[in-house]
Image (cartoon, helix red, strand yellow):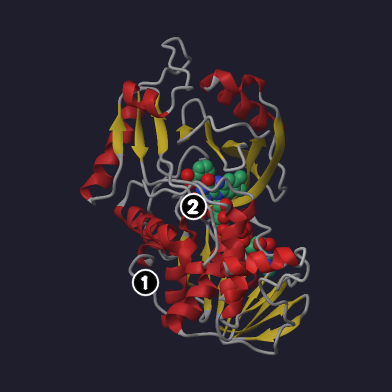
Amino acid sequence: MFKYSFLNLIRQSFKKHKDWPQAWRKPDPKKSYDVIIIGAGGHGLATAYYLAKEHNIHNIAVLERSWLGSGNTARNTTIIRSNYLLNESSDLYEFSLKLWKKLGSELNYNIMFSPRGLLTLAHSEHDLYQLKRRVYALNLKNIDSDILDIDQIKKLCPILNFSPYLRYPILGASFQKRAGIARHDAVAWGFARACSNYGIDIIENCEVKGLKIINNQINGVETTRGFIETKKVGCVVAGHTSILAEMAGLKLPISSIALQAMVSEPVKPILDPIVMSNAIHVYVSQSAKGELVLGAGVDGYNSYGQRGSAHITEKTINALTELFPTFGRLKMMRQWAGIVDVCPDASPIIGQTPIKGFYINGGWGTGGFKATPGSGWIFAYTIAQDQPHKLNEAFSLERFRSGYLIDEHGAAGVAH
Ligand code: FAD
Ligand code: PYC
């Protein structure tokens, strides 16, 4: 590990930071692999990493149509929390939250995980009732989450607008102390380097264009860099799950919609916790660089355009300044969108499909970043064992036929 050590940092500085070793190899695709993962976002890379680490499978390729981490991993606002309502979800997100805590040291990479707490504001009796319901459900499972009164909120975030004349005055909040944010690119880079060290081939600029299926069994993938043989394919393509599934002849109950975010100019530390308000409709955190990172809802129509509608931008900024009048003079620097695949119950699909050797991990909607390590862990298990892990049993495709949906529209957050 000397290559990545502090001493090496000093050594490189004497070399004027020239000739840094590559963090991950750039191999050409081989003719065949034991497992192919489509999509080098956080989830795809985490899956490959845990396949090698936990299941001793090393002959793996991760195929990425663009550059590594160019999808929603790099476009999201990095909120990490486990405060979901239903057992299936809170078990999954809590498992992931525990992995986040040790991920930096496990990957030997500074992913800047910062557990600064998340305030979800209540602006009506109904909001308070819903938040209490979720907090009590979490507490029954020994997952931390509290209801705060106005004085407690003031201590955590004095710059909020506490006026009783606010359109929707603040009445209370829920608070999850262990919730936080992380540096999204670093998560992808850390997993990529660890994958490469395990001998996994990460192949960028390699788009999957077709799937070869013989007698209902995956036999390989057609790519822009040629055909590659394999008997196992994990599809982890966030906003493009329906497109890949269609290549396998599957029609999924997914809507693909643009979700946007934006950042302000950097300012000195002013906002400690993450703040979410569903009613006024904005969420915001302050990054380590000092920028305010914010967003709100999805566009009102399906599309693959990674821009986001102008009226949503305007509404989001109006909501921000209504809730935080002091941000009224901030300049906004950048705005963008990513395509999110949303299932009818706002929960993901993680598991096998009717095609043997074809596995899907998608439909995370607006909230999959927080699940990155946990999702990779259980998806690796599913692929290696050819059966679901107990944490993703309920998140099967089959649930849309059986009707056992996992409705998390409320807990999935402000963006739904
Ligand atoms: P991605 O990072 O998108 O990776 C999929 C990869 O597949 C991409 O790199 C893509 O190029 C590649 N690909 C697609 N098609 C092909 C093909 N045919 N061949 C090869 N490669 C292909 N979640 C949270 O938990 N907290 C948040 O605060 C949060 N905020 C968000 C804010 C925004 C604006 C957006 C858009 C999303 C947000 N999310 C959030 C959701 C989160 O970003 C995603 O759920 C998560 O990052 C998905 O990770 P991934 O690795 O599956 O996808
Ligand atoms: O999942 O917490 C979340 C989230 C907030 C904004 C977008 N996603």
What secondary structure is found at the residue carrying circle 1?
loop
Between 170 and 226, the residue placed more toward the observer is: 170
* Location of residue 228 with respect to 414 vertically, above or below: below
Taking the image as shown, residue 334 lies to the left or right of residue 396, namely right
Q: Amino acid at mark 2?
A: Phe
Q: Is residue 167 above or below residue 194?
A: above
Identify residue for label 1. 389
Give x and y (percent) for residue 31. Answer: 70, 90
Q: Residue at x 51, y 32 (%)?
A: 271
Residue 49 in picture, x, y percent from top left:
52, 74
Q: Could you tell me residue 131's position as x and y percent?
A: 33, 35
Label at residue 113: 2
User: Is 49 situated above or below 71?
Assistant: below
User: Are circles 2 and 1 on residues that touch, CB within 8 Å?
Assistant: no
Q: Residue at x 41, y 46 (%)?
A: 179
Q: Nearer the viewer, mark 2 or mark 1?
A: 2
Q: Position of residue 104 (x, y in %)?
A: 49, 61
